[in-house]
Amino acid sequence: MTTTNNAATRAVYSRRRARLAAKLGPTGVAIIPTAPERPRNRDTDFPYRHDSYFYYLTGFTEPNAWLVITGEGLTALFCQPKDLEREIWDGYRLGPEAAPAALGLDAASSVADLDTRLPQLLENRSTVWWPFATHEGLETRIDGWLQKVRSRVRFGALCPTEQRDACAILDEMRLVKDLHEQAIMRRAAQISAQAHVRAMQTSARMLRDGRDVREFHLEAELLHEFRMGGSQYPAYTSIVAAGANACVLHYRADEAPVRAGELVLIDAGCELDGYASDITRTFPASGKFTGPQRELYDLVLASQDAAVAATRAGARFNDPHEATVRVLAQGMLDVGLLDANTVGTAQDVIEQRAYFPFYMHRTGHWLGMDVHDCGSYVEPTEVGQVSERCDPLSGETIKDRPSRILKPGMVLTIEPGLYVRPGPGVPEKFHHIGIRIEDDAIVTEAGCELITRGVPVKAAEIEALMAQ
Ligand code: GLY
Ligand code: MN
Ligand code: MN
């Protein structure tokens, strides 16, 4: 990733900082650290990933960096100082001298000056904003700086009297993706879609060639395509689940054999320039669905179609989920996963959550810099409208609040599924079939833009692709 932003990109970050500053109040100040480096073993770290809030405001990807923004809109970066010896070992550092011009900030200092400069920056401010519950030890550091300010009150210094959660502002900002973000997310989605195409074709080809295909072989194809597309890393640990493994929701890519006649569920997406993509496709390992597989696949796809049709500005976040559940509930009765004599009508299935053994997750989540991105799922203007109901399965009391009203630029996944474990009355032909279909959608005025359809989703199109 770049450490120097061009003028247009600098303007993007600077507009975001100005929007944040305007919400801090004239005597507010915000402190936003990036993420720490994390050791993996002895002296080797996990690949470094910046903090999403920090990156959203700077575009800066080096570790050991902090951003301070005042309510007047003054911005100061604390970053690693230039150090030839460290740079020989660890790589280039932008350094405080070059940072203001490169990133469009007012000032920059060495991160070594943090403990001296922060008390000065907090002095005579009323409110300190920082991201609550995101960085271990941050609260203690801020306490230390506040104590230093307090020690100077007898010299006339005013100490902040209020601390507030910066995430409350930043989550709302990040929820609606600007054009810069949408463009990156489209590119990330294209790379991931291509990776799924590659994995499908490899599966069919290797099986045609009589090879011993394992889940990790398909994962390797995904990773190859991610990297070839310029992605820095996978957005999350890839799921490559052959056969019955697809019924394990958080399965990883392991070493199970990929067998002709079985389905493979792949849930994998790359991260590109700080933004995630998140795609799931389920396909027949050797390229042709069996009858029962196809029956359930078409049902999940119909439920996804219904969810897509329910996704548009003005609709609620829960609408796609409810549309999915309506289609799945009726479908479960139609294909014989549920028996109408026992569970009643589709409406009964919904009210009693009788679909739950086969569909136990929600239909989507926000997507952005984080795979499960930030942003409230409750409509902020209606947060006080609480209703209570008793969950028919657990007996617990659930508090419902009106779900979020969708706006253009919000990005969410649409990912219905069906997971069939053997059980009383469950037709044997469906046993161990696990299917999920997941696409990423940008909400528009009239509907939504599916940015992940570079990989086919219709059963016949998947078969045609895999026959090539
Ligand atoms: N891959 C994570 C998810 O679909 O939520
Ligand atoms: Mn997802
Ligand atoms: Mn996923």
Image (cartoon, helix red, strand yellow):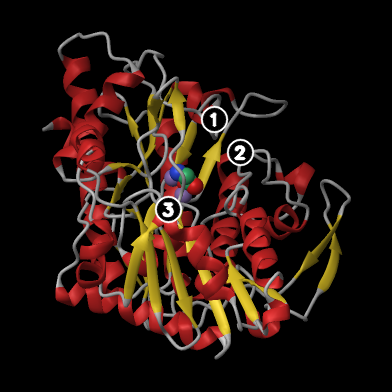
Q: Nearer the viewer, residue 99 or 118?
A: 118
Residue at image position (16%, 45%) is 229
**Which residue bears the numbered disc 2?**
336
Q: Nearer the viewer, mark 2 or mark 3?
A: 3
Q: Amino acid at mark 3?
A: Ala
Residue at image position (39%, 14%) is 255
**Which residue bears the numbered disc 1?**
247
Separation of marks 2 and 1 at Cα, in angstroms: 19 Å
**Which residue bears the numbered disc 3?**
112
Locate residue 214, reporting x and y percent. 32, 15
Of mark 2 and mark 3, the one earlier in the sequence is 3
Of mark 3 and mark 1, the one earlier in the sequence is 3
Separation of marks 2 and 3 at Cα, in angstroms: 66 Å
Marks 3 & 1, CB-CB < 8 Å contact: no
Helix, strand or loop at label 3? It is: helix
Marks 2 & 3, CB-CB < 8 Å contact: no
Locate residue 215, reporting x and y percent. 35, 20
* Relative horizontal placement of residue 139, taking residue 65 as reference (left or right): right
Q: Which mark is residue 286?
A: none
Residue 468 lies in quadrant = top left
Residue 311 appears in the picture as rendered:
no
Q: Amino acid at mark 2?
A: Gly
Residue at image position (85%, 64%) is 389
The answer to whether the beta carbon of the residue marked 1 is less than 8 Å from any atom of ligand 1 is no
Q: Nearer the viewer, residue 63 or 242?
A: 63
Of mark 2 and mark 1, the one earlier in the sequence is 1
Marks 2 & 1, CB-CB < 8 Å contact: no
* Relative horizontal placement of residue 130, taking residue 19 as reference (left or right): right
Separation of marks 3 and 1 at Cα, in angstroms: 50 Å
* 430 w.r.t. 5: above or below: above
Helix, strand or loop at label 1? It is: helix
Q: Amino acid at mark 1?
A: Cys
